[in-house]
Image (spheres, coloured by chain):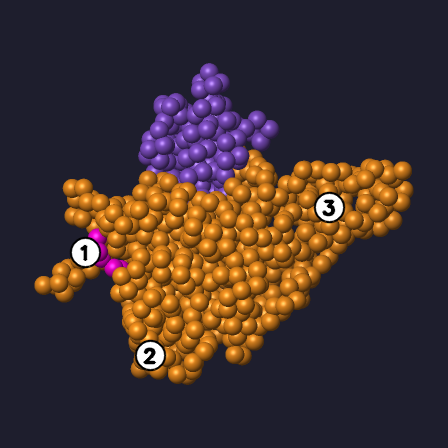
Chain colours: A orange, B purple
């Protein structure tokens, strides 16, 4: 007689201690540069282009330098000189031309790190400079073509309702026009990029600070011409990524692997902060132009928008960034007629790439600031206008998607507005005491969870759960924990689904040799998409063991061991998208994402009217997460992501000159400290998504990046009357706005 | 040159050129990789250790200056089976996400709590202002330190 399945309290919804916490707080977590040196290990470095564009005539090695113990790799050492991402335009090493400052040309390795630095200086690149293109406007003009036929790396268009958008706008009572811009932003994970590579009879091995081991695997297959089973990519404990370690690690890993192959020795490449900030990917700068029409009661009607993004010198992930950008450009609102065109252009700057939000923060900045202006013209409070027009369950988006489920827009607005006292504070007007002015502002936003449109179906992500001896389970997935808590939350999901305890679940180190390709750790998909596969697989294992218990009795562990005696017990499953998700890649219409997460942010600021420094004194955030499997970790994502958004809005800016980064150091690229961070009041709203694991979880990792900037700009406008349409709201820019608006006034 | 120092309560001798960074000596010959390098220029605080009880950036301290002195790294605060209240709070309260800033953050917090057992939130933020975190937004770090302070006081002031 078997026992029935033990009834345990559900782990989903509880703040279990982080599984990797003890290792991290005792300094025992092993990040890539904590790995002890391998026998014979060399250090590796890249020699990089000093100019943004030119013809590479030759490479000279100083003959007075002792090269005998230095390994040299150049373009000809590659089987196929391509970094495999989406379009085959980026070489691993420049061969006949360079297209951005810091483009890698030569790789060097040496056992002596200091000699290696001298070796880098002993290489001269003979480059004939060509005229570079360094900004969006110049690129769009097409005067100088640096990529493809016309510098355009990608275009999209979204159209809904009246095709004659200009006529539709003209018929509206109130027409507003504006232009908006966002700058480059650096991910600034505190652990720099790093990889250690070596070769042996099993092939090539690389371990590193990596979000997506299978991306590196794919890049290795292409550039090194090795078969899949001879490539072993492992994620080490990773000190932050935020997208910056999504596609870039393929490059640093290839560099280390090439040097290792040529030298016959293991090679360690860890960037110093300056090289990291200069050479790796950053957020796409953007420009948006919006003309909108609404009726005099504030009903939004017609939206015409053009979006331009700077992809940098090579395409990398730009088509997907632009896609997400255009799909979020109309904001969280219902429009009748929509016409949006989005264009990504090339410039001779280091390729831009993934950074939390991935195109959406750029366009949401624009639409939110624009609607703040529309509200001002109507004499309405912006949140009144936004609440009136926000999408609700059953409404249709700009791509024609009917929001059939899990729409927490109104509860989020209500909660944030109530808890912050927004309306009372707004009506009171700015509070001016001495040279300080206080104001309050808000933003409303949504963020699509998971890959766009047909992405997940094409990806066919997989995850596995194995039964281990003693009634234990092991989760095998390529999804990485980069701080957001994958290792903990997946264990909660699996334990609940199988009916075991948290301590009974292992999480395999993400190494491509052992784990299936779950798809990349990006797009806010890890819990919602991959977690749902883990849940199904764990449930299947649990059911198999329970069936054995019913048949022949015993504990879960005893029944499990009997099954294992007959052979492996594994559930390897593929993601199943909700059956009703329908997306047309050609017309850009349909269900852009299975669901959206929703939020409302309210920021309170204090502006020093002499120095124009802005201090964020309070921040309220209400977020619809579907279901919070680990509430503290959900809030941690909101708080951390919001502070990155605050940094972007106030003090972070990559300064470029001649295609070079002028501030590639933490000294002069400023991110918020504990003194800059406001007290966060975060409220989780749960409108479960029935296809989400753990009771309906949705993806939320990127959502917080969208709302902080516009909320702060609205608060600064409330405090000072200055309406910023460009980020960051640095003291210099606010002063400049103040001068130009007093000129207008007089 | 041979340099003698006390590391996490134990006497250690290293043979090193005096100008080598303390950070490199800790992570290399002294085999204490818990102290991390984030920027190499004293901005991020990931390399914070206690030198005679005072928080310093190990990337800016030459080993020659450490002769005869007392150094505490994160490894000296507690072990996985015996977490200090401060370490336990970071795990429990969400004070650590990716963990790379955590060792430095813990040492800075330890220095604060030793000199100021009842810190206000403002004092906590001031003490941690030299430790950059990109993941947490700092709120849960501040809460962790506040909770740990209470636990330490209840425990009669023991770390």
Q: Secondary structure beneath disc 1?
A: helix
Provide the chain ID for the residue under circle 1: A
Q: Residue at x 22, y 45 (%)?
A: A431
Relative height, residue B125 to residue A39 (above, below): above
Q: Residue furthest left?
A: A746
Which residue corresponds to mark 3? A498
Relative height, residue A372 to residue B97 (above, below): below
Q: CA distance from mark 3 to mark 1?
A: 60 Å
Q: Position of residue A507 (x, y in %)?
A: 65, 46
- Quarter of the image for the N terminus of chain B: give it: top left
**3 or 2: mark nearer the eye:** 2
Q: Position of residue A222 (x, y in %)?
A: 59, 69
Q: Earlier in the sequence, mark 3 or mark 2?
A: 2
Provide the chain ID for the residue under circle 2: A
Q: Position of residue A126 (x, y in %)?
A: 36, 71
Tell me if label 1 and label 2 are in contact, CB under 8 Å: no
**1 or 2: mark nearer the eye:** 2
Which residue corresponds to mark 1? A735
Crowdedness of circle 1 by 10 Å Cα count: few (<14), some, many (20+)? some
Which residue corresponds to mark 2? A171
Q: Secondary structure beneath disc 3?
A: helix
User: In the displayed structure, does residue A712 sit left or right of residue A562?
Assistant: left
Crowdedness of circle 2 by 10 Å Cα count: few (<14), some, many (20+)? some
Residue A721: within the magenta?
yes
Mark drawn on residue A119: none
Residue A153: within the magenta?
no
Q: Secondary structure beneath disc 2?
A: loop
């Amino acid at each position: 007689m078997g026992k029935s399945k033990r009834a345990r309290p559900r782990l989903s919804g509880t703040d279990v201690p982080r599984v990797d916490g003890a290792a991290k707080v005792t300094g025992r977590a092993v990040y890539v540069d904590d790995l002890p040196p391998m026998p014979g290990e060399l250090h590796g470095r890249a020699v990089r282009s000093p100019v943004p564009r030119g013809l590479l005539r030759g490479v000279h090695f100083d003959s007075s330098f002792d090269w005998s113990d230095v390994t040299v790799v150049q373009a000809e050492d590659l089987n196929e000189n391509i970094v495999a991402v989406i379009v085959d335009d980026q070489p691993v090493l420049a061969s006949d031309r360079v297209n951005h400052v810091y483009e890698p040309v030569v790789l060097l390795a040496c056992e002596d790190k200091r000699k290696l630095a001298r070796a880098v200086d002993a290489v001269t690149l003979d480059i004939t400079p060509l005229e570079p293109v360094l900004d969006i406007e110049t690129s769009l003009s097409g005067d100088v073509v640096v990529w493809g036929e016309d510098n355009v790396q990608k275009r999209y268009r979204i159209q809904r309702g009246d095709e004659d958008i200009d006529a539709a706008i003209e018929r509206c009572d109130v027409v507003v026009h504006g232009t908006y811009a966002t700058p480059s932003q650096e991910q600034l994970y505190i652990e720099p990029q790093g990889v250690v590579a070596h070769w042996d009879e099993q092939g090539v091995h690389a371990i590193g600070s990596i979000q997506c081991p299978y991306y590196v695997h794919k890049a290795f297959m292409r550039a090194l011409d090795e078969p899949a089973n001879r490539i072993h990519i492992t994620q080490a404990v990773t000190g932050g990524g935020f997208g910056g370690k999504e596609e870039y690690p393929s490059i640093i890993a290839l560099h280390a692997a090439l040097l290792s192959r040529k030298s016959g020795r293991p090679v360690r490449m860890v960037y110093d902060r300056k090289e990291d900030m200069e050479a790796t990917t950053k957020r796409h700068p953007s420009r948006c132009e919006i003309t909108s029409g609404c009726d005099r009661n504030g009903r939004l009607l017609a939206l015409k928008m053009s979006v331009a993004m700077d992809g940098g010198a090579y395409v990398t992930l730009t088509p997907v960034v632009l896609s997400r950008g255009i799909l979020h450009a109309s904001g969280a609102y219902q429009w009748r007629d929509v016409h949006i065109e989005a264009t990504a252009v090339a410039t001779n700057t280091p390729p831009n790439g993934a950074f939390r939000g991935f195109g959406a923060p750029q366009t949401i900045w624009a639409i939110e600031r624009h609607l703040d202006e529309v509200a001002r013209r109507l004499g309405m409070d912006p949140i009144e206008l936004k609440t009136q027009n926000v999408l609700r369950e059953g409404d249709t988006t700009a791509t024609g998607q009917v929001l059939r489920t899990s729409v927490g827009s109104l509860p989020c607005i209500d909660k944030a507005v109530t808890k912050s006292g927004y309306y009372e504070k707004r009506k009171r007007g700015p509070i001016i005491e001495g040279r300080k002015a206080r104001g309050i502002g808000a933003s409303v936003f949504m963020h699509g969870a998971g890959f766009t449109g047909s992405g997940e179906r094409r990806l066919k992500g997989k995850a596995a759960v194995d039964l281990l001896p003693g009634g234990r389970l092991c989760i095998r997935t390529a999804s990485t924990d980069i701080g957001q808590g994958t290792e903990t939350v997946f264990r909660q999901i699996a334990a609940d689904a199988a009916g075991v305890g948290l301590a009974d679940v292992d999480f395999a180190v993400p190494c491509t040799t052992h784990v299936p390709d779950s798809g990349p750790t990006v797009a806010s998909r890890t819990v919602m998409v991959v977690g749902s596969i883990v849940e199904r697989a764990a449930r299947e294992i649990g059911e198999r063991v329970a069936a054995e218990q019913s048949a022949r009795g015993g504990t879960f562990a005893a029944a499990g061991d009997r099954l294992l005696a007959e052979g492996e017990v594994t559930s390897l499953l593929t993601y199943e998208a909700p059956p009703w998700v329908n997306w047309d890649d050609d017309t850009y219409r349909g269900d852009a994402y299975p669901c959206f997460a929703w939020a409302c942010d309210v920021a309170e600021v204090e502006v020093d009217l002499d120095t124009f420094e802005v201090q964020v004194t309070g921040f309220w955030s209400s977020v619809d997460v579907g279901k919070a499997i680990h509430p503290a970790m959900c809030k941690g994502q909101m708080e951390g992501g919001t502070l990155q958004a605050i940094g972007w809005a106030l003090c972070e800016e990559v300064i470029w000159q001649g295609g070079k980064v002028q501030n590639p150091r933490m000294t002069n690229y400023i991110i918020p400290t504990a003194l800059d961070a406001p007290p966060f009041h975060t409220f989780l709203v749960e409108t479960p998504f029935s296809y989400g694991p753990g009771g309906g979880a949705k993806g939320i990792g990127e959502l917080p990046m969208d709302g902080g900037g516009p909320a702060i700009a609205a608060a600064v406008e409330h405090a000072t009357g200055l309406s910023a349409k460009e980020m960051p709201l640095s003291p210099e820019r606010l002063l400049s706005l103040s001068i130009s608006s007093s000129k207008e006034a007089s | 040159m041979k340099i003698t120092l006390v590391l996490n309560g134990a006497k250690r001798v290293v043979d090193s050129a005096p100008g080598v960074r303390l950070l490199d000596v800790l992570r290399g010959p002294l085999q204490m990789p818990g102290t991390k390098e984030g920027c190499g220029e004293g901005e991020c605080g990931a390399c914070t250790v206690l030198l005679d009880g005072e928080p310093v950036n190990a990337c800016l301290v030459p080993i020659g200056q450490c002769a005869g002195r007392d150094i505490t790294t994160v490894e000296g605060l507690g072990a996985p089976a015996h977490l200090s209240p401060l370490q336990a709070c970071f795990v429990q309260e969400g004070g650590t996400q990716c963990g790379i800033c955590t060792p430095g953050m813990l040492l800075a917090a330890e220095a604060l709590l030793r000199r100021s057992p009842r810190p206000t939130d403002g004092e906590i933020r001031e003490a941690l202002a030299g430790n950059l975190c990109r993941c947490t937004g700092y709120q849960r770090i501040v809460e962790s330190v506040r909770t740990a302070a209470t636990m330490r006081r209840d425990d009669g002031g023991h770390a």
